[in-house]
Image (cartoon, helix red, strand yellow):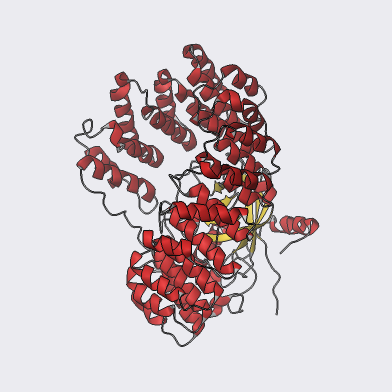
C-alpha cells in the first residue's frame, strides 16, 4: 500500500519516540484478547506450534481435519518440517476439494523435494482443473524432477499465463539443481523473446542466469535484444548475468554499452560481472565508469570484479581511478589489484601498511588488511593484526585474507608450515570466526592437510569449548574438518536443539500489516512484518526490537545486487544469540525489498536478517521470509558495509474498541 512522503515522515518521527521505562514493552497497546490476527484461533496456534516443534504425527492427523482452513495450514506446515513421512498423505491432499489445500500440498511436496513424488505430481496434472494448482505443481516438480520429469516440464502445454509461469519457474528450479537440456534452454529463450508475462520472463531469465554449464552463445542475438530493450530491470539484470555464458566477438562492446547506458545500477553491475575473460583494454572505459558509478554498489562490484580478474589490468588506470574513489571498500579492492600486479611490492606494502595503521574506522581497516594479502610478504603483519584485533571484524577479515592467500595457485611452498601454524592458532583462539574460517581452509583437499595435521585433537578440543546453539556455525565447520582429516564420510549436519518456543502472547498483539521503522545513517526504511506467515520469526524480531538489540549495530554485509545484512552484535557475520529459532517456509518469493532471516542452515536462525536488492528466487524456501520493505527502498540501495543502524522501532497503533 502506497503512503505519502509526509505521512511516512510523521510515522517515522512517531516511531522514533522511545517508550518510557514504566510503559509496557509489548509491541502495541492492543491486548491478546482482541482478534488482531489469525492467531486468536487456538487451533491455528496449535498447528504452528506443532510445526515449530517438528511434530510430524500430530500434524498428519490434522491433514484430515473437517475444517478446510486447518487442513491447509497443516499441509503448509510440512513445507517447514520437510519430513518424507508426510509424502503419502500430502499426495492424497492433492485431491482435496479445496483449491487452497491442493496448492499448499503441492508447495509442501516441492519443499520436501523427494523424487518419489514425481510421478504422482505428473499424474495429478492430467486432471487438475485450477491454474493456481497447476502452477504450484509444476514448480514443485522442478524441485525434485529427474531427466524424465524435466522432459515432461519442457513439453507441458500450458493454456493460461498462471500455469505457464508455474512451468517457467519449474524449469528454473530444475536448472538450479543442474537438471537441464538444450530443449529447456531453447524454451527459456523463446519465452523471453515472445513478450510473455513478467513472471514467465523473470523465471526464464533466471533459468538462463542460474543454470550452470550451459552455452548461450547460439542465442546471443535474442539475449542482446532482451538485455537492451526489456521493460523490466529485473529481467534485464538476470539476462546481463546470463551473458557470462555467451562467447561472441562483440561481447565487450555490448556489455560496455549496457554498463554506460542502462538506467538501473543493478543491470549495470550485472553486465560488469559478465565481463570475466575479456581483455582489459576492451572494457577499460566500462570499468572506469563502474568505479565512479553514482551507486556505491556498482563501484563495489567493479572493484570485486577487478580482484577476481586482476591479470592484465593496467596499473596506471587503477591509480588514476584511486584518486577519484572515496569509499574504503572500493579503495581497498583497487589497492589489492595494484599491489598484486606491481613488480616492486615491498615499497607499496610499506605504504599501505602505514595507511592501515593510520585508519581508525574498523571496517575500513578490515578492508585494508584484506588488500595487503596481495603481497605474500605481508602475511606476518596480517597474522599479527588478526590475532590482536580489538574489533572482531578486523580479525575476521584478516583470517579471510590469510585463507585466500593460502589457496592462491602461486602460493610459495616455503610458507606452507607457517600458514599451517597460523590456522592451528586460529582454531585454538577461541574466536568463533577465526576457528570457523581456519577449519574451512584445512579441509580443502588441494592443500593436503591430512599429512600436516596427523593429530587433529586440537579441532575436537576447540569444538568442545563451543557454546551451542550460539556457536552452531563454527561447530558445523569444525565437524566437517574433523570428518575430512579422519577420512570418514561427512557426518550428518549437527542439529540445533529446540530452545525458543513461539511467544504467542506477543504474536497476538501484532497486526497482519504491523510496521517497523529502521533508522540508518543513510535514511529511514519501513518494513511490514508477515506475522501470519512467520509468527516465530516475527515474534523473535519484535522481541529483539523491544530490547533495543539492533540499536547501534551495523550493516556488516552488503553484496551488490543481492542483500544488505545486519543484526550481528560482533559486526562480522559470526555473531548469534544464545538460542535459535526454527525456519518457517511459506509460499512467498524473494523479490526486491524482501526481508529474510540469515542462517547457517535450516533451523539455525537467531538475530541476523537481510534485505534483498532485487529478485533472488534461489533463496525461496531456504531462508525464512518475515517482512518486506514498504518505504525507503532507495535507502536500501545505498547501504554500505559499516553503515550504522541508529535505532529500530515498531509503529504503534492506537487501541480500537
* x 38%, y 37%: residue: 434
| Relative image position of residue 569 (x, y in whole percent) | 50, 46
Left or right: where 13 falls relative to 61: right
| Relative image position of residue 141 (x, y in whole percent) | 43, 65
In the foreground, 529 or 87: 87
Q: Quadrant of the C terminus?
A: bottom right
Asked if residue 341 is positioned above or below residue 368 in the image, the reply reads: above
Name the residue furthest bottom: 66
| Relative image position of residue 19 (x, y in whole percent) | 66, 60
| Relative image position of residue 212 (x, y in whole percent) | 44, 46
Q: Quadrant of the N terminus?
A: bottom right
| Image mark count | 0
Name the residue furthest right: 6
Q: Is residue 247 visible?
A: yes
* x 42%, y 60%: residue: 150
Left or right: where 166 falls relative to 231: left
In the foreground, 30 or 403: 403
Q: Is residue 500 visible?
A: no
Quarter residue 427 falls in = top left
Quarter residue 640 falls in = top right
* x 54%, y 33%: residue: 304
Amino acid at each position: 500500500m502506497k503512503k505519502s512522503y509526509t505521512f511516512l515522515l510523521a510515522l517515522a518521527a512517531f516511531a522514533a519516540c522511545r517508550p518510557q521505562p514504566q510503559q509496557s514493552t509489548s509491541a502495541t497497546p492492543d491486548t491478546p484478547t482482541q482478534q488482531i490476527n489469525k492467531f486468536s484461533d487456538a487451533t491455528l496456534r496449535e498447528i504452528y506450534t506443532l510445526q515449530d516443534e517438528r511434530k510430524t504425527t500430530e500434524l498428519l492427523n490434522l491433514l484430515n481435519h473437517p475444517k478446510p482452513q486447518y487442513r491447509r495450514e497443516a499441509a503448509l506446515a510440512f513445507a517447514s518440517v520437510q519430513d518424507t513421512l508426510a509424502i503419502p498423505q500430502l499426495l492424497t491432499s492433492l485431491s482435496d476439494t479445496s483449491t487452497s489445500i491442493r496448492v499448499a500440498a503441492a508447495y509442501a511436496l516441492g519443499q520436501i523435494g523427494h523424487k518419489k513424488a514425481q510421478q504422482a505430481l505428473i499424474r495429478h496434472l492430467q486432471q487438475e482443473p485450477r491454474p493456481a494448482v497447476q502452477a504450484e505443481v509444476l514448480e514443485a516438480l522442478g524441485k525434485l524432477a529427474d531427466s524424465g520429469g524435466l522432459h515432461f516440464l519442457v513439453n507441458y502445454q500450458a493454456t493460461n499465463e498462471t500455469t505457464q509461469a508455474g512451468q517457467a519457474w519449474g524449469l528454473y528450479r530444475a536448472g538450479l539443481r543442474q537438471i537441464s537440456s538444450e530443449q529447456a534452454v531453447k524454451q527459456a529463450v523463446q519465452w523471453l523473446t515472445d513478450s510473455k508475462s513478467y513472471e514467465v520472463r523473470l523465471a526464464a531469465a533466471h533459468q538462463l542466469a542460474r543454470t550452470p554449464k550451459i552455452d548461450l552463445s547460439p542465442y546471443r542475438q535474442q539475449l542482446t535484444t532482451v538485455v537492451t530493450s526489456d521493460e523490466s530491470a529485473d529481467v534485464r539484470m538476470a539476462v546481463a548475468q546470463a551473458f557470462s555464458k555467451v562467447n561472441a566477438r562483440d561481447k565487450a562492446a555490448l556489455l560496455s554499452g549496457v554498463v554506460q547506458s542502462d538506467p538501473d545500477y543493478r543491470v549495470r553491475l550485472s553486465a560488469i560481472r559478465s565481463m570475466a575473460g575479456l581483455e582489459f583494454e576492451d572494457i577499460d572505459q566500462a570499468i572506469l565508469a563502474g568505479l565512479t558509478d553514482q551507486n556505491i554498489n556498482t563501484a563495489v562490484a567493479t572493484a570485486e570484479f577487478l580482484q577476481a580478474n586482476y591479470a592484465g589490468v593496467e596499473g596506471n588506470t587503477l591509480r588514476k581511478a584511486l584518486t577519484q574513489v572515496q569509499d574504503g571498500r572500493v579503495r581497498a579492492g583497487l589497492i589489492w589489484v595494484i599491489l598484486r600486479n606491481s613488480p616492486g611490492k615491498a615499497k607499496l606494502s610499506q605504504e599501505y601498511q602505514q595507511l592501515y595503521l593510520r585508519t581508525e574506522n574498523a571496517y575500513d581497516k578490515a578492508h585494508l588488511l584484506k588488500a595487503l594479502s596481495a603481497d605474500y610478504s605481508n602475511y606476518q603483519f596480517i597474522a599479527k593484526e588478526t590475532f590482536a584485533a580489538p574489533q572482531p571484524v578486523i580479525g575476521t577479515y584478516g583470517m579471510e585474507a590469510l585463507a585466500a592467500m593460502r589457496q592462491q595457485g602461486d602460493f610459495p611452498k616455503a610458507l606452507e608450515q607457517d600458514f599451517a601454524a597460523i590456522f592451528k592458532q586460529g582454531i585454538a583462539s577461541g574466536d568463533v570466526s577465526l576457528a570457523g574460517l581456519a577449519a574451512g581452509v584445512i579441509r580443502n583437499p588441494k592443500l593436503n592437510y591430512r599429512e600436516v595435521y596427523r593429530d587433529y585433537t586440537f579441532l575436537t578440543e576447540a569444538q568442545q569449548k563451543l557454546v551451542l546453539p550460539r556457536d552452531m556455525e563454527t561447530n558445523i565447520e569444525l565437524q566437517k574438518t574433523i570428518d575430512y582429516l579422519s577420512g570418514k564420510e561427512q557426518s550428518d549436519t549437527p542439529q540445533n536443539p529446540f530452545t525458543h518456543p513461539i511467544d504467542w502472547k506477543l504474536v497476538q498483539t501484532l497486526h497482519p500489516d504491523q510496521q517497523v521503522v529502521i533508522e540508518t545513517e543513510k535514511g529511514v526504511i519501513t518494513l511490514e512484518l508477515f506475522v501470519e506467515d512467520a509468527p516465530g520469526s516475527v515474534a523473535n524480531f519484535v522481541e529483539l526490537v523491544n530490547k533495543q538489540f539492533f540499536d547501534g549495530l551495523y550493516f556488516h554485509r552488503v553484496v551488490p545486487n543481492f542483500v544488505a545484512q545486519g543484526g550481528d552484535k560482533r559486526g562480522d557475520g559470526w555473531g548469534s544469540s544464545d538460542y535459535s529459532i526454527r525456519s518457517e517456509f511459506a509460499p512467498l518469493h524473494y523479490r526486491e525489498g524482501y526481508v529474510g532471516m540469515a542462517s547457517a542452515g535450516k533451523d539455525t536462525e537467531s538475530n541476523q536478517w537481510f534485505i534483498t536488492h532485487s529478485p533472488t528466487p534461489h533463496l525461496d524456501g531456504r531462508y525464512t521470509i518475515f517482512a518486506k520493505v514498504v518505504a525507503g527502498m532507495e535507502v536500501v540501495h545505498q547501504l554500505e558495509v559499516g553503515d550504522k543502524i541508529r535505532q529500530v522501532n515498531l509503529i504503534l497503533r492506537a487501541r480500537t474498541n
